[in-house]
Image: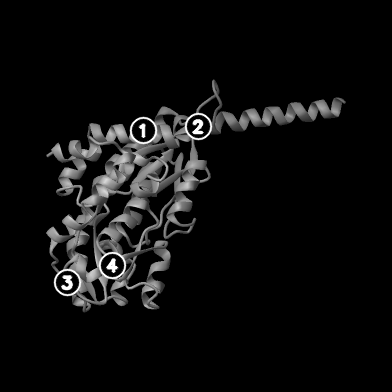
Amino acid sequence: MKKILGLVLALTFFASFVYAGGGSEAGGSKKEEATLKLAHIYAPTHAFSIGMKNIAAAAKEKSGGKLIINEFPAAQLGSETDIANGGVNGSIEMILVGCGEIGKRYTPLLIMDGPFLFSGYEHARKVLDGPIGQELWDGCLKATGLRHLRANYYGSRNVTTKKAINSPDDLRGMKIRAPEQPMNVAIVRAMGAQPTPMALSEVYLALQQNVVDGQENPIPTIHSQKFYEVQTHISLTKHMTQFPTLFIRDALYQDFTPELKKALDDAVKEVGPSIDKAVLDDEENLLSDMKSKGMTVIQPNIDAFVKATAGVYKEFEKNWGPDLYGKIQAIR
């Protein structure tokens, strides 16, 4: 009994020692250091991946080496759905995922992927960083346990195919890959095509083998995924402007010391604008590069696409209520 009691006391002491430096329950000490996984689906050459590495480096420096963020790009930890699930259940501490994916779990966020929702980048930033955005992020936190750190500019989505697309009529009967997200699927269908959901990591081969006729993504993603090798035309529909968002599990964040929280928050605030700028620059520069590689650039009838997709808002309005769209449009 003495040996057993001694072992119990030793284990209790060890557990208390580990927890003092590494975490807390209610009333315990805060985490003074942490090593986190950060997962996303974007290629290592994409501005998002470069940005996440820069955030990790800044957080490490600002915390004096106490906050280590290990990035897992290019769907190494699974599809975007897998990554989002990992963030919600706590198996992945930090995630960078689209509003459409998180919108499966907190439906008001689906509006952020609405067709032609934003008049431009500045309009979008005012919405996302202002009162409307904060209300959505607070609701998401309550529903999912994920704390919003920053919404990052991904670009405007454009259609690529092996023929010219000038209007929705040109998409009739075509299989167009869409992300496995409700709004994306609805928009592709509204534009006249047959949406074919699949993970981003599967798209190149699907295009190469003619499993699908085309896909739609922002220019930096089209370039980093080398879709220009298996597609001949890009139609600048700009039908959706997206801001995939960096989240951290809030229970973990609240367990940090104030110093660790500040190191992370300051790193994101410092690096974030450079991510947006890189994507904005890439939209212009990488389109020119793809054109030089033989891709034909089409300026389509935008009004026809706006008209074709207008009904998507009525279809999804129950997810966010009747007033939110109008409030977003009123911000300028």
Residue wearing tag 1: 139
Residue 31 is labelled as: 2
Percent x, y of residue 221: 30, 62
Is any part of residue 152 visible from this angle?
no
Residue wearing tag 4: 223
Q: Which residue is outermost to the right?
A: 1
Residue wearing tag 3: 297
The amino acid type found where label 2 is placed reads Lys
Front disc: 2 or 1: 1
The figure's colour scheme reads one colour
Q: Look at the image and tell me in which quarter the C terminus lies.
A: top left
Q: Earlier in the sequence, mark 4 or mark 1?
A: 1
Q: Is residue 228 left or right of residue 96?
A: left
Q: Are marks 4 and 1 in contact (CB under 8 Å)?
A: no
Percent x, y of residue 183: 32, 52
Viewer-nearest residue: 220 or 274: 220
Q: Earlier in the sequence, mark 2 or mark 4?
A: 2
10 Å crowding of disc 3: few (<14), some (14-19), many (20+): some
The amino acid type found where label 4 is placed reads His
Q: Is residue 38 above or below residue 301?
A: above
Residue at horizontal 32 percent and vertical 49 percent from the top: 244
Quarter assignment of residue 253: top left
Q: Earlier in the sequence, mark 3 or mark 2?
A: 2
Q: Is residue 222 above or below residue 5?
A: below
